[in-house]
Amino acid sequence: MWEESTRKSASDPGLWSGGPTDLENNRLIVCAYHNVGYRCIEELLRQGARIELIYTHEDSPTEEIWFASVRELADSHGIPYLTTDISLPENVALVRKIAPDFIFSFYYRNMIKAEVLEIPRSGALNLHGSYLPKYRGRVPVNWAVINGETETGATLHYMVEKPDAGDIVCQEKVAISFSDTSHDVFGKVTDAAVTVIRAAWPLLRQGTAPRIAMDLRSGNYCGGRKPADGEINWGRSAVQIYNLIRGVTHPYPGAFSSLDGRKVIIWEARPIQGQGEPGQIVSANPILVGTGDGLLEIRSLQFEGEQEQTPEQFARHHVGAVKTFA
């Protein structure tokens, strides 16, 4: 369905007419979502880019929407937008009619078919939330935190049929501290993405941007994550469990276990020295739990259907008998 905006309707035959454009008057189609999409569009507009159409997504009713709205940004600038998949036949025809010089993908969630990638005169480019070729694929920021990485980044690369495999135009690294959550790192990556677009767009517009072949052998590929993937294995080390917790804590679904047959989400913790049987609560306040290597101090947790609890609140109801997370 075509979303109403302050610009002309997509059905207007005069909206996208005319012949080829020169390099200083490029036509862009942008596929975008989330904060990265919002901020990168802002940067392109700041540089005077001519965005003809935006493809974005309807917000999911099952997802916590904590990020900026690309739809609202498009409305505020009078840019037409669609929330249907750019690879649908009717949209492929529309893209051909617009005849863009560039297509950009900024955290767009649909795979863009090869027939669409071949349309823009000067190429189709994607902004990926890692320092490629590391962490190709889905949710790269979460995976980097979960795996205990100390750095990641943002990469602008040309799109080819194989995901996250095309030539690199520009990259920016960001540090991951031991206390960073995925939300913290996502903020850093978003800033890095804007820096990349700020540097790359003038070169792309002038036709002088570099193209550096990606060596996929030196990287890795990660799949998507589901809420169920946040289940804690207490046999792993305290550091590994801590990395999982900070990798999926707010605004993500959280790392979880069960206690007394009830699901418990652990939102905040830290690894400390000590010993205990994996999953066994060795102290109620502070909440100290044994792992495969070290102790985990839980600082915030939540029983399913209840409010988040502090260690003090937890201790009022869980003192005395030895209990174990399953």
Image (spheres, rainbow, N blue to C red):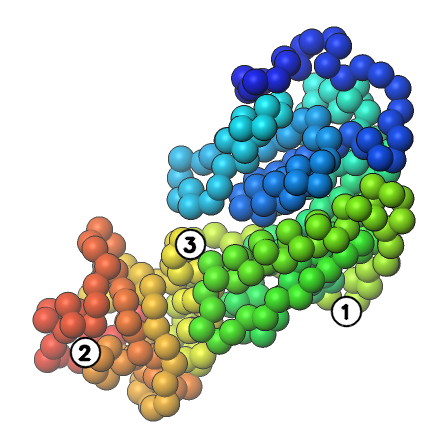
Residue wearing tag 3 = 252
Badge 2 marks a residue whose secondary structure is: strand
Tag 2: residue type? Ala
Tag on residue 218? Answer: 1
Residue wearing tag 2 = 284
Tag 3: residue type? Tyr
Q: Image quadrant for the N terminus?
A: top right
Q: Are marks 3 and 2 in contact (CB under 8 Å)?
A: no
Q: Earlier in the sequence, mark 1 or mark 2?
A: 1
- Residue 222 placement (x, y as % from top left): 62, 59
Tag 1: residue type? Ser
Residue at position x 82%, y 60% from top?
A: 214
- Residue 54 placement (x, y as % from top left): 64, 30
- Residue 9 placement (x, y as % from top left): 63, 13
- Residue 166 placement (x, y as % from top left): 81, 51
Q: Quadrant of residue 238?
A: bottom left
Asked if residue 188 can be seen in this view, the reply is yes
Q: Are marks 1 and 2 in contact (CB under 8 Å)?
A: no
